Image (tube, rainbow, N blue to C red):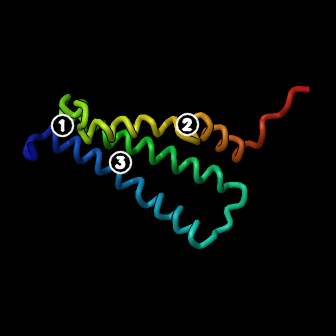
Amino acid sequence: LAADPGVRHLVAEAALAQDALLPQLVALADDVDRAVDHGDRWASLLVGAKVRATRTAGEVVRRAVEVAGGGSFRTGDELGRLYRDVLAGGFHPSSDRQAAETIATTLLGPVPRAS
């Protein structure tokens, strides 16, 4: 399996996605530890990290399922469980929609009320 060019490509793509996320999470965690003052941006930074982490986990697990094949959907299979967990991540607070609203409000201000 490790010599298959398709498998190698999928594994490399998964690693690239995961490697890109790690420095972002480490930097944000460091800011939390050091009590950096991001002011009103904290909420958007945190929900943005959650959304990016969930999306990246989805990419990584989908590629792992492609490598492992359909057997990973069998009841009790660990990869199948991870796939379901990743799918559920998009619905946990903040959902992608809620996160987008938070980020947009931080960047653009609240939606003006109709008079």
Is 102 left or right of 86, judged from the image as shown?
Answer: right
Which residue is under mark 1?
A: 68
Front one among 91 and 106: 91
Q: Which is more N-terminal, label 3 or label 1?
A: 3
Tell me, yes or no, whether the two marked residues, 3 and 2, touch with CB atoms within 8 Å. Answer: no
How far apart are the two marked residues, 3 and 2, measured between alpha carbons?
A: 19 Å
Tell me if residue 43 comes above or below residue 98 in the rendering: below
Based on the displayed image, in which of its 4 quarters is residue 55 positioned?
A: top left
- The quadrant the C terminus occupies is top right
Residue ID at (78%, 40%): 110
Front one among 11 and 69: 69
Residue ID at (52%, 64%): 29
Which residue is under mark 3?
A: 17
How far apart are the two marked residues, 2 and 1, measured between alpha carbons?
A: 28 Å
Residue ID at (64%, 44%): 103
Label 1: state its secondary structure. Answer: helix
Tell me if residue 42 comes above or below residue 62 in the rendering: below
Between disc 3 and disc 2, the foreground one is 2
Based on the displayed image, in which of its 4 quarters is residue 114 positioned?
A: top right
Which residue is under mark 2?
A: 96
Q: Which is more N-terminal, label 1 or label 2?
A: 1
